Amino acid sequence: MNSYDTIVIGAGAAGLSAALVLGRARRRILVLDGGPPRNAPAAHVNGYLGIDGLSPLELLDVGRTQVEKLGIEIRAEAATLVETVDDGFVVDAGDERLHAKRLVLAAGITDALPDIPGVAEGFGVDIFHCPYCHGYEVAGQRLAVVATQPMSAHQVRMVRQWTDDLVFFTNDTIELDAAERRLFAARGVDVVDGPVSQIVRRDGALQGVRAGGAMHEVAAVFVAPTMVLNLEAFAGLDLGMTDTPMGPVVATDPMGATNVPGLWAAGNVADAGSQVIAAAAQGARVGAMINGSLVEEDWAAAAQPSS
Ligand SMILES: Cc1cc2nc3c(=O)[nH]c(=O)nc-3n(C[C@H](O)[C@H](O)[C@H](O)COP(=O)(O)OP(=O)(O)OC[C@H]3O[C@@H](n4cnc5c(N)ncnc54)[C@H](O)[C@@H]3O)c2cc1C
């Protein structure tokens, strides 16, 4: 069985950053890359100091090149099963069983989109979930928030910061009482009740939102997808979870350690709200923590009396 100091599961910003730190600490590392990152539908990574506006895939290409230069292998394979063993973990990927002393869980999130025609085609293009990522590019125009879950009530407050011309579609999902309607009116937010039947697109461009038989023209739409953690391979571990307003995430201590000894988590899987720069920072910290734990293990072994 091939054996590594650490296997990194997920080759997004979090996983590649962890690999970069561990590679620079001269550790034997394997990165498993299960496919595109969460933000693959978007043209740009916005809000990342120094590389603001680079494409998500270009950013990871640069990251992969830097990691591979350190002699680290990146395999285009997903981890399908993770199990604990006495001296670490075994991980199934492709046809192989692999061994590692430590694991980085950086497998991210899948966005389960609301079942409204038009949303899937425009997600990341002109239908967004995060105003910090895309609000600036559409600011000042007529924008819509379509309610898809309780978090949408928070989203409408946030998106209002990026425009004075906002319409909120309650979409039979959120009920506003009289006081809330007065507050929305005071903040200049239009409210349209009733179900949204379609996000209308023509020739790849957003036209508007169809609700109650009427078409409402808008420049961009915000929705709140359901965030599904990519944890299938980890189902056999008794991973601790923690509830957040965005849904449950993997529970970690401030340094990224989970309740499973030897397993650290970074990026969206442990912090659903982290943007790319934060996911990268979490990965870098986890890389350093893992190296530190391996250093301590070596010194503890040296302190044992030799037989
Ligand atoms: C449409 C959209 C646009 C966004 N735009 C921005 C933006 O402009 N700026 C910004 O800062 N943030 C943006 N984000 C947020 C950004 O996507 C996240 O912050 C970032 O992707 C988190 O990085 P991560 O490494 O945790 O996860 P990811 O980037 O999703 O990486 C996780 C990786 O793990 C892989 N994986 C999953 N399961 C396995 C497995 N079993 N084995 C191996 N690999 C696996 C996945 O395929 C993926 O490649 C956007 C998000 C969306 C949805």
Image: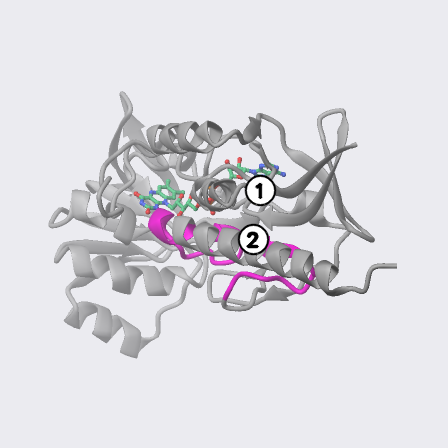
Quadrant in which the C terminus appears: bottom right
Residue displayed at 46% across by 33% down: 67
Asked if residue 30 is positioned above or below residue 5 in the image, the reply reads: above
Quadrant in which the N terminus appears: top right
Q: Quadrant of ligand 1?
A: top left
- Cβ at disc 2 under 8 Å from ligand 1: no
Q: Is residue 135 left or right of residue 42?
A: left
Q: Main secondary structure of the magenta part?
A: loop
Instruction: Tell me where residue 271 appears, x and y as whole percent.
Output: 47, 58
Which residue position holds label 2? 291
Q: Is residue 288 left or right of residue 141?
A: right
Q: Quadrant of residue 301?
A: bottom right
> Does the image show residue 224?
no
Q: Are marks 1 and 2 in contact (CB under 8 Å)?
A: yes
Measured in 3D between alpha carbons, the distance from the residue under mark 1 to the one under mark 2, in whole angstroms, is 8 Å
Q: Secondary structure at mark 1?
A: loop
Instruction: Tell me where residue 21 appears, x and y as whole percent.
Output: 46, 46
Furthest-right residue in this view:
307
Residue displayed at 33% across by 60% down: 155
User: Magenta stretch: residue 275 in it?
Assistant: yes
Magenta range? 255-279
Of mark 1 and mark 2, the one earlier in the sequence is 1
Q: Nearer the viewer, residue 172 or 292?
A: 292
Instruction: Tell me where residue 200 appears, x and y as whole percent.
Output: 31, 33
Asked if residue 79 is positioned above or below residue 235 in the image, the reply reads: above
**Residue count near mark 2 (Cα–Cα under 10 Å), binned few <14, some 14–19, many ≥20:** many
